[in-house]
Amino acid sequence: GCYVAKFYPSSELDERDRLDAEFIVLQFLRDNGIECVPRPITADRKLRCAVYEYVEGEKISPSNISLSDIDQAVQFLVSLKALRRREGSERLPMAAEACFSVQAIFDTIKTRLNRLLPLQEQGSQYLALHGFLVNEYIPSLAEVRRWCEEKLKGEGKSFSAELKSEERTLSPSDFGF
């Protein structure tokens, strides 16, 4: 078979241990019958490297997405949800930007927004982005936040309360066509 070696950034530069998170979750998925993900082979934490099975494939053009492709994607998500109660799932590392409350989602958006706003000083090509963020995105985001707060309050739910662990599910990052 073919294999791929993947090198991960140093833990000192990134507080998340991406190697452990990816390797452990892929092993959990394979151990629980999910075979449409790469098989983890071995990992060396000192070298910050892991070896995975190479999965042959090609990028799917948006114009070529079929109902079968969508069905397979949905089935994969359903399979992940079914694993949330399997032994060992409670010990899986959380995703880097896991959000378990509506407040956490808005906090994550704000963090990303704060990374983009200073780009105005890095050249004229960023002025249009900055203008859009300040004049359109931030006001729209504030409106969406107010709407969420009102809706949740009207339903007797909390904006900042976290989902209980039994309500959480595995969720793939960077997943799509």
Image: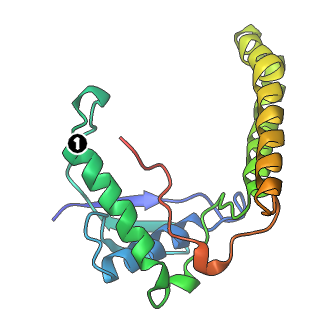
Q: Position of residue 43 (x, y in %)?
A: 43, 75
Residue situated furthest left in the rendering: 1
Q: Position of residue 111 (x, y in %)?
A: 79, 45
Residue situated furthest front in the rendering: 154
Q: Position of residue 44 (x, y in %)?
A: 47, 75
Q: Secondary structure at mark 1?
A: helix
Which of the 4 quarters of the picture holds residue 125?
top right
Residue at image position (75%, 17%) is 132
Q: Is residue 98 above or below residue 175?
A: below
Q: Position of residue 87 (x, y in %)?
A: 46, 91
The answer to which of 123 and 73 lies nearer the viewer is: 73
Quarter of the image where the C terminus is located: top left
Q: Is residue 47 visible?
A: no
Which of the 4 quarters of the picture holds residue 58?
top left
Residue under pointer 1? 67
The answer to which of 117 and 90 lies nearer the viewer is: 90
Q: Is residue 110 above or below residue 33?
A: above
Q: Amino acid at mark 1?
A: Leu
The answer to which of 44 and 162 lies nearer the viewer is: 162
Residue at image position (32%, 76%) is 30
- Number of residues whose C-alpha sits closer than 10 Å to that of mark 1, classed few (under 14), some (14–19) or many (20 or more): few
Residue situated furthest top in the rendering: 124
